[in-house]
Amino acid sequence: MQELAMVFAALGNEVRLKIVEMLLKNDGMFCSEIVNELHLSQPTVSHHLKELRRANIITYKKEGTLIFYQVNKEYLYEVLSKFMKLLKK
């Protein structure tokens, strides 16, 4: 249940939902691309990315000095399928 709470809390923010949508649409993005797309400051975007990472919604990998983010689809499927099972009870 804690997983569900963390995922829903993280996705309960409009900016974070937009980030997830952008990452899914583009099959991942660099942090600088997210900043440019959202027209928000880099620290603000970093804060939102940190919250999404904390909830395991996104993963990242360093490519030199750049950081590439992707949605952790497998984890989301797993957590959301648990939620769907709760609905069927």
Image (tube, rainbow, N blue to C red):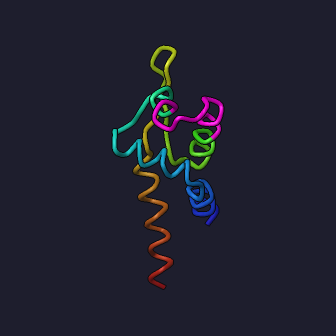
Residue farthest to the front, as pictured: 39
The x and y percentages for residue 10 are 60, 53
Look at the image and tell me in which quarter the N terminus lies: bottom right
Of residues 31 and 76, the one nearer the viewer is 31
Q: How many marks?
A: 0
Of residues 26 and 40, the one nearer the viewer is 40
Q: Is residue 86 above or below residue 46?
A: below
The x and y percentages for residue 25 are 34, 44
Tell me the magenta residue range.
35-47
Residue located 49% across and 61% down the image: 79
Whether 65 is among the magenta residues is no
Q: Quadrant of residue 5?
A: bottom right
Q: Quadrant of residue 24?
A: top left
Residue farthest to the top, as pictured: 64
The x and y percentages for residue 89 are 48, 85
Q: Is residue 78 above or below residue 63?
A: below
Q: Is residue 12 above or below residue 89?
A: above
Residue located 57% across and 63% down the image: 4
Whether 36 is among the magenta residues is yes
The x and y percentages for residue 42 are 60, 29
Residue located 45% across and 73% down the image: 84
Residue located 48% across and 34% down the image: 34
Residue farthest to the bottom, as pictured: 89
Q: Is residue 53 above or below residue 13?
A: above
| Prevailing secondary structure class for the magenta stretch in the rendered image | helix
